[in-house]
Image (cartoon, rainbow, N blue to C red):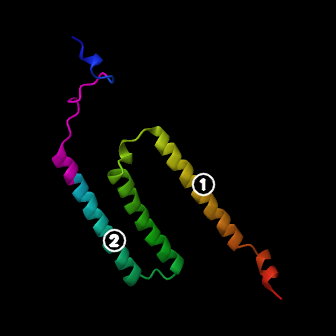
Amino acid sequence: MDSSHDNPTGHDSHDHPIDFAKAIRTYLMVGGALVFGTIITVFVAYKVDLGDIHLNIALGLLIATVKVSLVALIFMHLNHERGLIYKTLLFTMIFFAAMMFLFCLAYLDPIKDSFFKP
């Protein structure tokens, strides 16, 4: 008797056993990395002065980006997703960067000063 009729995917459910010890170890390591990243973020916020507040903000955002990437890839299981999710995430990042660029252009616009002068 063919077992493919019982399972529509054609794969036996025991083809890929889950190694729970490895998964728990991965989650604990990522959790530890997130705690370490939080400690680094607090240290950078209170003890590191790069001379310009914009550089300090950029460093904080870089650390936050690494932490968000760990959460998304490991805890949200995006490291196992197909191409469509990556295309959607790429579009979102490009849209976000374009919007930030437009906000910067609007902030640096010299014409805005003439509207606020009496």
Give the residues in magenta.
Answer: 10-25
Residue 21 percent location from the top left of the image: 16, 48
Secondary structure character of the magenta stretch overall: loop
What's the residue at 33%, 52% (across, down)? 74
Q: Quadrant of the N terminus?
A: top left
The type of residue carrying mark 2 is Thr
Does dot 1 land on a helix, a strand or a loop?
helix
What's the residue at 40%, 41% (across, down)? 81
Nearer-N-terminus badge (2/1):
2
Residue carrying label 1: 95
What's the residue at 39%, 54% (across, down)? 72
Rendered position, 26 above or below 10: below
Rendered position, 93 above or below 32: above
Residue carrying label 2: 38
Residue 89 percent location from the top left of the image: 50, 49
Depth order, front residue of 17/106:
17
Q: Quadrant of the C terminus?
A: bottom right
Among the 4 quarters of the image, the one containing residue 47? bottom left
